[in-house]
Amino acid sequence: MAKSQRTAIVLVAAGRGLRAGAGGPKQYREIGGVPVIYRAMEAFSRHADVFAVQPVVNPDDSAMFTAAVTGLKHEPPADGGATRQASVLAGLEALAKHKPDIVLIHDAARPFVSEGVISRAIEAASRTGAAIPVVAVTDTIKLTGESGNVEDTPDRSRLRIAQTPQSFRFDVILEAHRRAAKDGRSDFTDDAAIAEWAGLTVATFEGDVANMKLTTPEDFVREEARLAAQLGDIRTGTGYDVHAFGEGDHVMICGVRVPHSKGFLAHSDGDVGLHALVDAILGALADGDIGSHFPPSDAKWKGASSDQFLKYAIERVAQRGGRVANLEVTMICERPKIGPLRDTMRARIAEISGVDISRVAVKATTSERLGFTGREEGIAATASATIRLPWSV
């Protein structure tokens, strides 16, 4: 592809997804612990050859959309229309001011689009002007009449299943959509059909059988099972940390500022709960410990907030293609009392790590007035982390 080509994406996410069953619009439901729309958008947002991602959403879903795609770069959402065709046109019109050369149009209900498919889509549109990803039909197809009787058996060697992203020269597909709207045509099932109606030749390129559209409840069950099977390497790590008390008026515990008559003697903010949790995650990854990644001898970590340490450890899991299954922290201290702040701490850990609060536990115990914690000279914490990684040799 010529370097001068500027590629943008229209991500169609305005549908209601009623066939997918209860749970709200399917694009905002989670699969493998991640919103469907996040998975679909992430691949485009991180692709080196894409400069703009234009989502199209139902105005009633604005809050859900914002929450689901936090952290991903995209254009302000365009309001969807009554049909998919109207929604695509809204997305194309929103992109017109950016004057892209190539546009890819993708359904948010296809969360498993790969970098390779995106690259092939860009290359194909640059070369042909209009192209769609396809996969071969492996089953025998029957054409039936109104009575339900078989009327014909098409040659499956010529049949293909169309997928998205469908890719086009931007000006050509925008004009085709405008013409269709002007002529009152709203019955096209995909953008390739509009291109064909407008007289364009639509090429094909290699799709991906994993790039399936989530439509029914059974689709979600099957894909959940597939994702779980891919993360069969289940690991558990443990962590321990301790900090002595010094002068101060508060301590940081599990990301929460807790008023206290003393502070921590520490290089960073001394958050023993988060430090123990970071060590547990790194231990599960067999990836050193917190000191090897954030050495106390490095002045840049002086007084540092420990939430960045936990975010870093979580990112290390994501880089390995893994997921966090459970995080648990046990605080060992006489004071301050942890019980009244337990759920606040759970919520803070969940917020920092991006893990659902149902997978976060915070517990507390005393040492029955024994030892340094019993004498209120400091606080200790233990932690465990369970993660799931893809199997590797």
Image: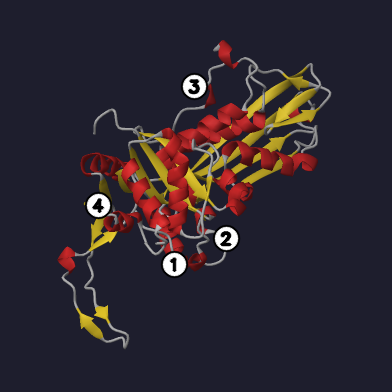
* Quadrant of the image containing the N terminus: top left
Identify which amino acid the numbered label 3 is placed on.
Ser
Asked which secondary structure carries label 4, the reply is: loop
Mark 3 or 1: the one toward you: 1
Mark 1 or 2: the one toward you: 2
Q: Earlier in the sequence, mark 1 or mark 4?
A: 4
Mark 4 or 3: the one toward you: 4
Question: Residue 120: where, in percent of width, then height?
Answer: 26, 43
Mark seen at residue 292:
3
Q: Earlier in the sequence, mark 4 or mark 2?
A: 2
3D distance between C-alphas at marks 3 and 1? 45 Å
Is 130 situated left or right of 174 in this image? Answer: left
Mark seen at residue 218:
1
Question: Residue 312: where, in percent of width, then height?
Answer: 52, 30
Quarter residue 241 falls in: top right
Quarter residue 182 falls in: bottom left
Is 126 situated left or right of 38 in this image? Answer: left
Q: Earlier in the sequence, mark 3 or mark 1?
A: 1
Per the image, the residue denoted by label 4 is 200
Identify which amino acid the numbered label 1 is placed on.
Glu
